[in-house]
Image (cartoon, helix red, strand yellow):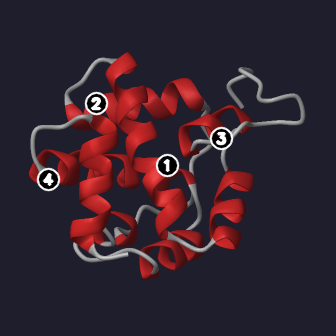
Amino acid sequence: MRLDEFLTLVRDRGEYHSEDEAEQVSTAVLWVIASRIGPDEAAGLASDLPAPLDDALRLERGRPETFGREEFLRRVAQRTGARPRTAEWDAGAVLSTLGEAVPGDRVEHLLAQLPEDCADLFGRRGGPEGGTHDGR
């Protein structure tokens, strides 16, 4: 997917005023994702995204951190300057677009590394019963 296509989808889903705003939010969400997954996974995901979005995934962060949905959203909010509820909206706009922009097997692998209660941010149901909110 081209950059303009990705940003247009994020802009429309997030109801942002501009593609610049969509790019800032996308970069913030991808940066937080990269801190949660391993470097190889981040590099693979980056290879499926257009520049400059791929840069947010290529930054060296060391070992992946383990944190749940609430911390994920807190970190997105911190990077965007938004409230946590807005960060959930932002993450959903970006991650549902990411789910369309990269191959399905890569999305499935990414989802397997994230807490089950993050699946809905990709526009999917999490867990065997539609998701949990256990913060894993």
* Disc on the earlier residue, 3 or 4: 4
Q: Which residue is denoted by mark 3 in the rendering? A: 119
Sequence-first tag of 4 and 2: 4
Indicate which disc residue 78 carries.
2
What number is the disc on residue 96? 1
**For the residue marked with disc 1, what is the amino acid?**
Ser
Earlier-in-chain disc, 3 versus 2: 2
Residue 28 to residue 15: above or below: below
- Residue at the spot x=18%, y=37% of the render? 16
Q: Which residue is mark 4?
A: 19
Residue 52 lies in quadrant:
bottom left
Q: Quadrant of the N terminus?
A: bottom left
Q: Residue 110 in the image: x percent, y percent?
A: 64, 59
Q: Residues within 10 Å of mark 4 (few under 14, many from 20)?
A: some
Q: Sort mark 1 into few (<14), some (14-19) or many (20+) by Cα contacts within 10 Å.
A: some
Label 3 crowd bin: few (<14), some (14–19), many (20+), radius 10 Å? many
Query: Which amino acid type corresponds to the residue marked 2 in the rendered image?
Result: Gln
User: In front of the other: label 3 or label 4?
Assistant: 4
